[in-house]
Image (tube, grey):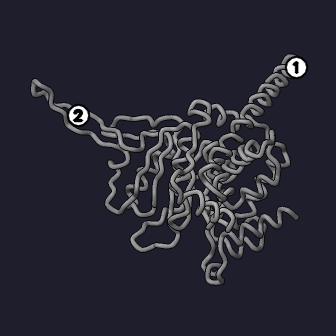
Amino acid sequence: MSVMKGAADAVDEKAIVAAAESALGEIAQVRAEVGKVIFGQESVVEQTLLAVLSGGHALLVGVPGLAKTKLVATLGTVLGLDSSRVQFTPDLMPSDILGSEVMDQDASGRRSFRFVPGPIFTQLLMADEINRASPRTQSALLQAMQEYHITVAGARKDLPAPFHVLATQNPLEQEGTYPLPEAQLDRFLMQVDVGYPDIAAERQILLETTGVGEATAHPVIDAARLQQIQSLIRQMPVGEKVVDAILSLVRSARPGNGNAATDKNVAWGPGPRAGQALMLCARARALYDGRLAPSIDDILALAEPVLQHRMALTFAARAEGMTVRDVIADLVKQARG
């Protein structure tokens, strides 16, 4: 019996390796295709793609004009997903996103309600400037992100599969905005910080985007194939040392776990969802880099985008000018030993 079980495991492992090797090539093509349109910003492209490959949602934080919208549109094309975009404003209502019931009247005068789906019924939704909408509208979207369905007039409506939200936020203007509560930030697998491009990338942007023709991206995979890759990522083996590194890093970011600097500077730390996110994203990052198994380096590289929106500093630490990123950088340095 045990011999048969061992043989089955070996076959399963071989099948996973074969599937992973074919996925490696497709992910490399996806990277190349996105690179035709988005110049520089390698870490932004990588982290956003990792969130989607891991089956999650991402929050892109950056000042206007850094191609966040263009990145989301390009990803929709390259991954073969239906996409839509909602510009969040203070007067946006939940029904503007979810959809609403309208009354129809037929030729005989009989009236009935008909559901008109909102823009959330798509595979890739861009929620532009999510912090400009009221908490009520934000929570309608964030609930759908968690549950993958909505309820209208007591009837459940399932969202398309796969379903991903890439939300953007401008870190500068805080007037007239409603910051996302911590519990809702936790729904995002990663927070991706979008910085300014380096000089070589900015030169390329100047030359490539001000001429007559602009480069366009083409589909590489489709929604069904993306779901297969997402399922494959969940099956990839993770070594014991990598699991220990995840637990160690997440727990070291929580006060009361024996880390003196964390106890002093962190008001509250990341919950178990952070560990789950690290586990999934590390597997996706290995595939993204052309490897078949994640390493401890993957965990440390993903620490900032996975942890930074899941923890908060004490008042004293903020008064000293510390940031969450500083704390995470110190934890990563300690983990490297």
Near mark 2 (Cα within 10 A), the count class, few <14, some 14-19 or many ≥20, is: few
Q: Quadrant of the C terminus?
A: bottom right
Q: What's the CA distance linking mark 2 and mark 1? A: 59 Å
The residue at the point 43 percent across, 49 percent down is 85
Residue 107 visible from this viewpoint:
yes
The front one of 242 and 119 is 119
Extreme residue toward the bottom, this view: 320
**Tag 2's secondary structure?**
strand
The residue at the point 43 percent across, 54 percent down is 139
The front one of 22 and 113 is 22
Near mark 1 (Cα within 10 A), the count class, few <14, some 14-19 or many ≥20, is: few
Relative horizontal placement of residue 90, taking residue 114 as reference (left or right): right
Relative horizontal placement of residue 199, taking residue 162 as reference (left or right): right
The residue at the point 45 percent across, 57 percent down is 128
Indicate which disc residue 173 carries. Answer: none
Disc 2 designates what residue?
A: 113
Relative horizontal placement of residue 327, taking residue 133 as reference (left or right): right
Residue 164 horizontal/vertical position (percent): 53, 44
Residue 204 horizontal/vertical position (percent): 64, 60
Residue 101 horizontal/vertical position (percent): 27, 39
The front one of 66 and 13 is 66
Task: In the rendered view, tell whether residue 99 sits above or below residue 202.
Answer: above
Disc 1 designates what residue?
A: 2
User: Which circle's residue, 2 or 1, is located before the other in the chain?
Assistant: 1
